[in-house]
Image (cartoon, rainbow, N blue to C red):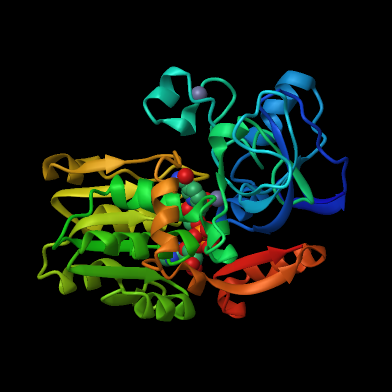
Amino acid sequence: MKAMVYYGAGDIRFEERAKPAIIEPTDAVIRLTKTTICGTDLGIWKGKNPEIEQTVIQKAGKFNGRILGHEGIGIIEETGSGVKNFKKGDKVIISCVSRCGTCENCQKQLYAHCQNGGGWIMGYMIDGTQAEYVRTPFADNSLYRLPADLNEDVAVLLSDALPTAHEIGVQYGDVKPGDTVAIVGAGPVGMSCLLTAQLYSPSQIIMIDMDDNRLHMARELGATQIINSAKEDAVARVLALTNGRGVDCAMEAVGLSATWDICQRVVKEGGRLANVGVHGQSVNFELEKLWIKNLTITTGLVNANTTGMLLKTCCSGKLPMEKLATHHFHFNELEKAYDVFKHAADQKAMKVIIDY
Ligand SMILES: NC(=O)c1ccc[n+]([C@@H]2O[C@H](COP(=O)([O-])OP(=O)(O)OC[C@H]3O[C@@H](n4cnc5c(N)ncnc54)[C@H](O)[C@@H]3O)[C@@H](O)[C@H]2O)c1
Ligand SMILES: [Zn+2]
Ligand SMILES: [Zn+2]
């Protein structure tokens, strides 16, 4: 089968790989019908996650590449003998987080840190979904039946972008009615923060990015104000828009030192800073200014513990997620899709959907 394989920083190749097989009785093998590219995949490609090859080299001495991708929907091709809830032919949404359901962390719904070989592993610690087939561990607990009335582009966003934004941005950021919110990063994850934040009725949502096209879309999807941080001082503007007070909740959805800085400088006393972005480098944590502010700062990897709830919200039409699917490519054009997503501003791209 064809797959997009990561070999190290700056080196990904669209090439022929062996089709995956069942390894554990709780596995399923799925034939993909749609996948997509995440900002995290771009980060891996740029070299933000050298632990991918380092982990393998430590164990086996040699790294033979890792198939990227942790999002997608598909049709079950084969199930292991221990899979009870799904059978060949079922249409499913693949969660980016696999969970055993029984370890101490899974019992706390901290599925991101499943201790039995689950967590975010697909397209990271094991081969992922940017392929014709994928093996998903703990299938019973980690797949969702695809409802017939759900837009399939939206279904792909339920793998990662939507639960990440809702859990690590909005829930950890504790967005409440009347709150003022700033979201730094208007990519698919930041946009999903914008949409799910509105489920909690904040009074103001200020969206910050450097891409005018994405900011324009943010305005259409409910941002009360937009700021292009390449053209103006984002911190000064947020303070001006909040009577000099700053916001109740700032969400970081980029993963850079510069965007962390904006967040730590715009949260008001008693506020929350929810970091969602994957950081490849240290940030400057201005504790000398923050210690006095009674802040809550959260970080995290998505647990996908609200995926089921978000799925129902999407089916009800309350989240216009389909607007994020700006580009479609055939799987054979995956390299082109990467190129477009990498140059999202020039290409006016948001989420790039790959069809098979
Ligand atoms: N915590 C988690 O579980 C989790 C899960 C999924 C994704 N992520 C992370 O969330 C982040 C966003 O993902 P995405 O898919 O939306 O990525 P993306 O690359 O599409 O979006 C990033 C956005 O940040 C903007 N940006 C870049 N540099 C900026 C700067 N200096 N100032 C202002 N804006 C800037 C870009 O224009 C872009 O719109 C990534 O870091 C990704 O790795 C985290
Ligand atoms: Zn992702
Ligand atoms: Zn577990």
Q: Quarter of the image holding residue 64?
A: top right
The answer to whether residue 6 shows anywhere in this view is no
Q: Is residue 131 above or below residue 225?
A: above
| In the displayed structure image, the side of residue 265 where residue 347 appears, left or right | right
Q: Is residue 152 above or below residue 100?
A: below
Total marks shown come to 0
The answer to whether residue 43 shows anywhere in this view is yes
Q: Considering depth in this image, is 274 or 238 the residue closer to the camera? A: 274
Q: Considering depth in this image, is 285 or 54 the residue closer to the camera? A: 54
Q: Considering depth in this image, is 334 or 246 the residue closer to the camera? A: 334
| In the displayed structure image, the side of residue 249 where residue 146 appears, left or right | right
Q: Quarter of the image holding residue 181?
A: bottom left
Q: Quarter of the image holding residue 88?
A: top right
Q: Is residue 149 above or below residue 113?
A: below
Query: Residue at the spot x=41%, y=55% of the render?
Result: 312
Q: Position of residue 133 (x, y in %)?
A: 77, 46
Q: Position of residue 178 (x, y in %)?
A: 13, 63
Q: Position of residue 227 (x, y in %)?
A: 33, 75
Q: Position of residue 110 (x, y in %)?
A: 41, 30
Q: Is residue 316 above or below residue 60?
A: below
Q: Considering depth in this image, is 263 or 170 the residue closer to the camera? A: 170
| In the displayed structure image, the side of residue 94 where residue 291 appears, left or right | left
**Which quarter of the rendered picture does the C terminus lie within?**
bottom right
Query: Residue at the spot x=20%, y=69% of the render?
Result: 204
Query: Residue at the spot x=18%, y=55% of the render?
Result: 176
